[in-house]
Image: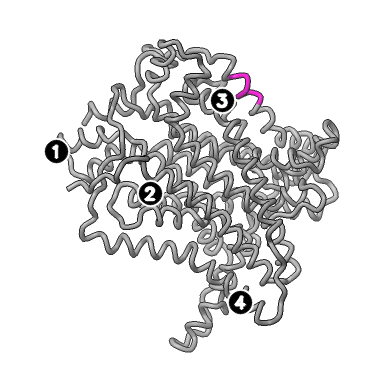
Amino acid sequence: MVSIARVIRVSAPGGPIGRMGRWTRAPAVIWVPALAVALVLALPLVYLVIRTVGAGDDAWALLFRWRTVMILLRTVALVVTVTAASVAIAVPVAWLTVRSNLPWPRFWSVVAALPLVIPSFVAGLVVQVALGPRGMLQQALEPIFGVTELPPIYGFPGAALTLTLLSYPYVLLPAQSSLRRQDPSFEDASRSLGHGRRATFRRITLPLLGPAVGAGSLLVALYTLTDFGAVSLLRYETFTWAIFVQFESAFNRGLAAALSLVLVGFAAVILAAEALARGRARFHGVGPGVTGEPARVPLGRWMIPAVGFMTALATLALVGPMGVLGYWVVRGVAAGETLVGVGDLVLNSLLVAALAALAAAAASLPVAALVVRYPSRFAWAIERATYTGFALPGIVVAIALVFFAVNLARPLYQTLPLLILAYVVLFFPAMLAAVRSALAQVRPSLEDAARTLGRSPIATLLQVTLPLIWPGIAAGIGLVFLLTMKELPATLILGPIGFRTLATATWSAASEAFFARAAMSALVIVLVSGVPLLLLRLHMGRVPGQDPPPARQ
């Protein structure tokens, strides 16, 4: 097994990584666009520094209050809990849907990923209404079991439950992509050496999942760090909530900027921890390997528990919330409430989501190539700079872009390009994580071979690298598309006058107490986002022209 572990974790000789561990310098065609992307994505951080410096001593006094420390500790507890729970859910689901003979694997893949499209403020409201002390569950149990009141769901338990059910797909999608791309010869070699399935999974499959799980966990942690909708509705005070309160109640936005810088500092700690855990290990082999998907493992007596687990997860994360929203729609229609058409809202949402996903995909390629193929302190700094937006609430990013647009590029103010830029700043790490983990599993020798055959760097990228990392790119496009569909604060602030999406319509209807309209818009978000997600999963689930691999006996 030592030889197999060495094959997994060493890189091929030659290429960007030399035999003596020296790093070759990245060509300008890679590092120049990567630097440009990082500078643009770091604009919100520049804004926060400017505002904080302008706040003077008041900002320092706010940061060193005991209340600020307590909010930080509560935020840390929530981030750690949600991240650990998301990994515990996502890794088994990824293995069941990709490597086992679970029936209808592509159906379960789509259902398990759909919670991504549910806005956090909608999910928080659903949890509050359904699982509250006198909620819908209590009303259903009272006639049968005499339950008069359920334990409070507010605070840490409700926030952790809600955010876990919304964010575990961040780990699931990269993990599924990684499992599909793993060289089955590693596992076959382990089995030929006498190791069982459990030992092979622990020593081979799980380490190979490291980049994908680490990248997904990073996204979960940053998403939890910046969420406002769920934590505010479920009354669990985090840094994001405190920042929103400062922006709304304080005349000096420098204080809110100071709190936002603390949030960035916390995100930097998370990024450093993820980079330390990832290290400089490589996760591709030195030989040609074996192409195609590995055979699926028969579940046997574990089939019923596996199907039960997937059913329970789908019910809790998707069917239950959708059922509550459907109940509100039916109840509102029965009460005579008018449901406004959503055709224009759907078109607007699809337009901005598609543009944001494509822009993020194009921007991620040079950054991923720099980080994976030419690792250095410069590459490390570039990667960390691109995560700034994901570590900040949408309102902070939107106000920062308004500041720069008004002062430096006034024609961009309240235009679609500025709104698309905001989406890219907010969700770029989701794309980068998927592309980076896919590129980490591609042997550099394949690209070197194309170059020795006379292919230019651009031709090598288009003909060799992109086809090999397409599953990762597709997963990243899906993530950014789904995230953009439900983004609210940036759309409200930066959208052109009269421009409305499904997310803004849901928020407006809920704030005006038109719950049936809000529920209808939320349901449409799920349905509209589910169609491209379904197509994506169907495309990634089977290699064209091949039958599914048989179950391994």
Whole-percent x and y of residue 200? Answer: 24, 40
Task: Name which residue lies at 55% across and 49% down.
Answer: 76
Magenta-drawn segment: 31-36
Return the residue at label 3: 366
Report the coloring of the rendering: one colour
Residue reaching furthest to the front: 545
Task: Name which residue lies at 73% across and 71% down.
Answer: 513
Residue 67 in sight = no
Residue 412 in sight = yes
Return the residue at label 2: 94
Q: CA distance from mark 4 to mark 3?
A: 49 Å
Q: Amino acid at mark 2?
A: Ala
Q: CA distance from mark 4 to mark 1?
A: 59 Å
Above or below, 322 relative to 243: below
| Quadrant in which residue 479 is drawn | top right
Task: Name which residue lies at 50% across and 61% down.
Answer: 161
Nearer the camera: disc 2 or disc 1: 2
Return the residue at label 4: 330
Above or below, 472 relative to 157: above
Dot 4 crowding, Cα within 10 Å, few <14, some 14–19, many 20+: some
Whole-percent x and y of residue 429? Answer: 57, 38
Whole-percent x and y of residue 268? Answer: 58, 36
Which element carries disc 1, helix, strand or loop?
Answer: loop
- 299 horizontally vs 364: left or right: left
Q: Amino acid at mark 1?
A: Gly
Q: Amino acid at mark 4?
A: Val
